[in-house]
Image (spheres, coloured by chain):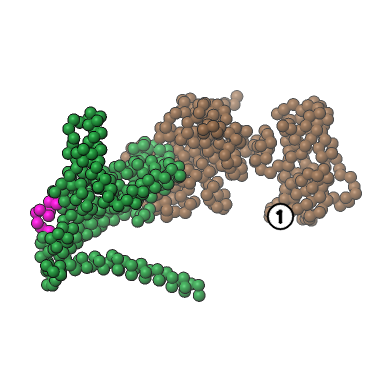
Chain colours: A brown, B green
Amino acid sequence: MEKLPVPLLELKSVTKFFGANKVLDDVDLSINDGEFLTLLGPSGCGKTTLLRLIAGFERPTTGKVIMNGKEISHLAPNRRAVNMVFQQYALFPHMTVFDNVAFGLKMKGLPKDEIEVEVFRALEKVKMNMFYLRYPSELSSGQQQRVAIARAFINNPKILLLDEPLSALDYRLRQEMQIELKELQRDLGMTFVYVTHDQEEALAMSDRVAVLNEGLIEQVGTPIQIYEEPKNMFVAKFVGEINVFDGMVIKVGDNDFETIVEGMFYRLRKPSTFDVVRGSKIKVLLRPEDLLVSKVNDPEAEAPDNALRGVISFLVYKGRTVDLWIQTAGGNMVMATQFFNEDDPDIIYEVNDVVNVSWIKDWEVILPDA
Amino acid sequence: MLKSTDNFCRQAVLYFIFIWFGIMVFAPNLLVLLASFLSRDPVWYLRLPLNLQNYAALSDPQLMSVILKSLNLAFCTTLFCLLIAYPFTYFIARFAKEYRALFLMLIIVPFWTNSLIRNYALISILSENGLLNTFLIKWGLISQPLKLLYTDLAVFVGMVYTLLPFMILPLYAVLEKLDLNLLEAAEDLGAGATAAFFRVIVPISLPGITAGCIMVFLPALTLFYVSDILGAADSAIVGSVIRDQFVVIKDWPVGAAINIALTIFMLFLLHLYYKSGNSVDQEQPIW
């Protein structure tokens, strides 16, 4: 039997008001020991507030924060076994890198020689040991970032909280740091709770992702679940690109149902998440990379079964892939990402090409039409 | 082409600053220095020959006791100003922007009235039948009016009152910029309120503290009219002594010598500060 992981931290129906403004709405969330959990959402969705609730900078208006079975909702930040990496790093400008990283251990009252060993060990992990005598103003933002991370994890917290730590870095550095952070997390075996609005970052780094919107958790799941099985339209649209088709259910069978999409007849597998009712409207969702595009040589010929006829209205060449925007006969704009196939070099798309658009059966996501 | 005009402008500004400093700072001080080595003349105030006699006057025990008393007053004034101004400024700096502007305005408004007149106003508060005594008696806290005016305490009150804004403004300049995230970071790393205050806020605001202390301490030694208006006959401060040498006794060389001695003492204090403050100079000083 699979053993259920014991949650390290639980948020139980946490609601937070700032004045009359409801920032978090009855949030339930469990964080498992050792996992990399990302809180993903647009700005103003409450993700930073959620992080600050865990850190202790905010108190829940109602609800509980529970760590290892003990309620800590009203415990001050300096009494919680969590540490935070701030968005703007918040390094102490009057202290050297060494003193910044040593601050937490000094507060704990560790002996000096022990602090020294620990600080250099931490700085080595973030490759900053050469810079221990520098002041934050003498470091690049990437280096400041590393110091801020070392300053937090050196205290060996139960949870390390990271508030959009990479947002101030340029694209290249961000990519590097994503990998390094993930490696660091594995190396330390520490629970990371990471806040970001960047869905790519969330998918790349996390064990689990919690998607937030307007103070509500829309979905919690692995990156694959979030991307491939979005529970609702918000998650589907926020995480990655997606094409949305309207459908009408015309017949419901045991395992599949029949529907009309863009004037075409389709037989699709019944979704497990809700009951498909005859005559109801549904949404059929497809990722751009799940669409198959084939050029039509004879535009007079009828489109084959399960294919939509369309015209390429513009395309964006991206090196490894090409993004096609296809105007369908039904008047919708569909985006399809095609990988270049080494074996088939003659596939060169051009604007105004007539194409058939289809997809591999069962790769679609069916959602009720809200 | 552009570069050379650019260069010219920079040069011009530099020259202007040098000339300005030369006329306004260097020349006057040089004149005082020169005067301190000249001899007294009953008509022309100064005459040759050069001598060191004037500095011998510094060893006068009476002058020495005035200097010590004056230093004590200046020290107490500075400390008290800091103790009042720091929390006050800290809380102002935490207010919303529009309120901050208002508070700063209220601090600056009294400057528009001559500080001499404001010190005269203190007389009506501190005198035997003044506002303070009247209220204290009315509330039954005392039965006899207190002797406040023409005491060292009154001089102290006058000094603090006059110089407080000079402590508040430089403190405000640093505390307004204080990044509150730093406080949260300190707290997050296990620091209680006291530790966060002394290990983070105070060190970061040290440039403001120093600037404020210098701006209060120096005038507190020399603002003679405060002790003239509010003090007793023996409340004279260094400033009064220098003033008397120049205006009453008309012994300019000795007055200049005391002045030079005071300047050297100040420079010595500044030197001590810079030597001790190497580690905090990371943040640019605000003056």
Which residue does the numbered mark 1 point to in the structure image? Answer: A317
Secondary structure of residue under mark 1: strand
Q: Main secondary structure of the magenta part?
A: helix
User: Considering only vertical position in the picture, is A85 above or below B210?
Assistant: above
Q: Which residue: 30% across, 68% down? A: B22
Amino acid type at image mark 1: Tyr
The magenta region covers B58-66
Q: Quadrant of residue B54?
A: bottom left
Residue B189, horizontal then vertical, whole percent:
41, 39
Residue occupying image coordinates x 27% and y 50%: B117
- Point out residue B21 in the picture as x, y percentages from the top left corner: 31, 66
- Residue B134 visible in image: yes
The quarter of the image holding the N terminus of chain A is: top right
Judge the density around disc 1: few (<14), some (14-19), many (≥20) Cα neighbours within 10 Å: few
> Which quadrant, please, contains the C terminus of chain A?
top right
Please state the total of marks drawn on the protein image: 1
Q: Pinpoint the chain carrying mark 1.
A: A
* Residue at far right of view: A300
Residue A28 seen in render:
no
